Amino acid sequence: CLNVGCIPSKALLHTAKIISEAREAAAFGVEFGRPQIDLEKLRSWKHKVVSQLTNGLKGLAKQRKVEILRGAGSFLDPNRLAVETDTGVRVVAFEHAIIAAGSQAVTLPGLPQDPRIMDSTSALQLEAVPDRLLVIGGGIIGLELATVYHELGAGITVVEMLDSLIPGADADVIKPLYKRIRKQYENIFLGTRVSNISAGKRLEVRFEGPGAPDKDSFDRVLVAVGRSPNGHAVGADKAGVRVDERGFIPVDKQQRTNVPHIFAIGDIAGQPMLAHKATHEGKVAAEVAAGVKSAFDATVIPSVAYTDPEVAWAGVTEASAAREGISYGKGIFPWAASGRSLSLGRNEGITKLLFEEATGRIIGAGICGPGAGELIAEAALAIEMGCDAHDIGLTIHPH
């Protein structure tokens, strides 16, 4: 999250938002000149944000007498770890261990080794803004980076193997985003896969799917088809820790692995692979290791795509309710009727709430529009607190 994930991406997304809002202000009678983008300065600013936070963590660790070893760690047995550092191998003995080894970007087989084919980590380096960028994968990571590169001047094509963008969110919640970026981007191909990429003067890409051409050429390609947990990279088997075939380490509600004194948190401990879930799990694991009676007991974990507009959801979706046979009622509010959104010049958003039919309790929410990532927190709290529609109606909001 901090080094190659949400923090650098949000720094760049903030830049994209400023460019977008400056351009859109022309409709209000306020015009700015074409932005002059200094990529080196932008990279330096992003690096400064990351460095400030990493140095802050080092300071917190030092205050609490936490020793940090930099290197590659691998278990030797259930109570020892070997760490390969710059100065040699150091063996660390432990009573408890928390595995937080994260995940890495998934690569597609058969692609040529070419620096113009990027994953999310290299895309965040912002080495250049291509004239034409192909984004393979219409999930959160791919669309967030597409947002950045689009505002910096790249022509964007998105290809997604499934029939909708951002799998996991309901189609009606995604619709405002889809309608907006369909006008902004060169192409969005759904139900389509990339069958081959050949590297020449440009990257020649072949497609298979309805509506897509047989081939097209791009200056750069971003592969954003998901992330793979690093469960097989830490020698967990030598500690007796079970790792499944995908690299996830199964844990219980206390974050314990099958070896009771070894815990796992974050991406490596299962879906959803989100930093705010990992933070909560880390707190639980630390408390349990310290002898506190604690468990991971979150009713919902919100998800957010910091695209433009943002998409956020928490709890039950209509798709999951249908799968699980949950009876529900729903309320949908179009932002075209919101004075706040009209004053922003952005009326495309929606808010959807799902309620348990028998009790009227809120069980799910989906929001699409500017600021959806902040707004979803209120819905998540309402679900955690067991609020019903009447409780929400009684809550007075500032206007």
Image: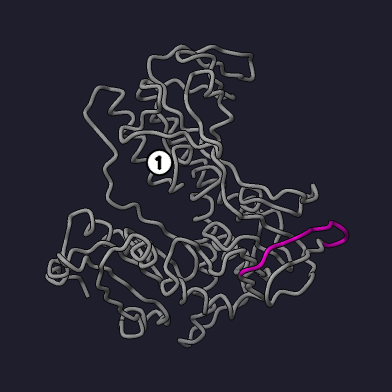
Q: Is 111 included in the stretch rendered in magenta? A: no
Q: Quick one: SS at disc 1?
A: helix
Q: Nearer the viewer, residue 167 or 313?
A: 167
Q: Nearer the viewer, residue 244 or 99?
A: 244
Farthest-out residue, right: 200
Which colouring convention does the figure follow?
Answer: one colour
Whether 181 is drawn above or below 258: the answer is below
Tell me if 235 is positioned left or right of 208 in this view: left
Relative image position of residue 263 (x, y in whole percent) = 39, 27
Relative image position of residue 267 (x, y in whole percent) = 47, 41
Relative image position of residue 112 (x, y in whole percent) = 80, 50
> What residue did someone put label 1 on?
278
Tell me if 223 is positioned left or right of 316 in this view: right
Give the residues in magenta.
191-202
Q: Residue at x 22, y 26 (%)?
A: 292
Q: Amino acid at mark 1?
A: Ala
Relative image position of residue 151 (x, y in whole percent) = 60, 69
* Quarter of the figure with the C terminus: bottom left
Farthest-out residue, front: 325
Q: Residue at x 52, y 78 (%)?
A: 180
Q: Residue at x 54, y 14 (%)?
A: 76
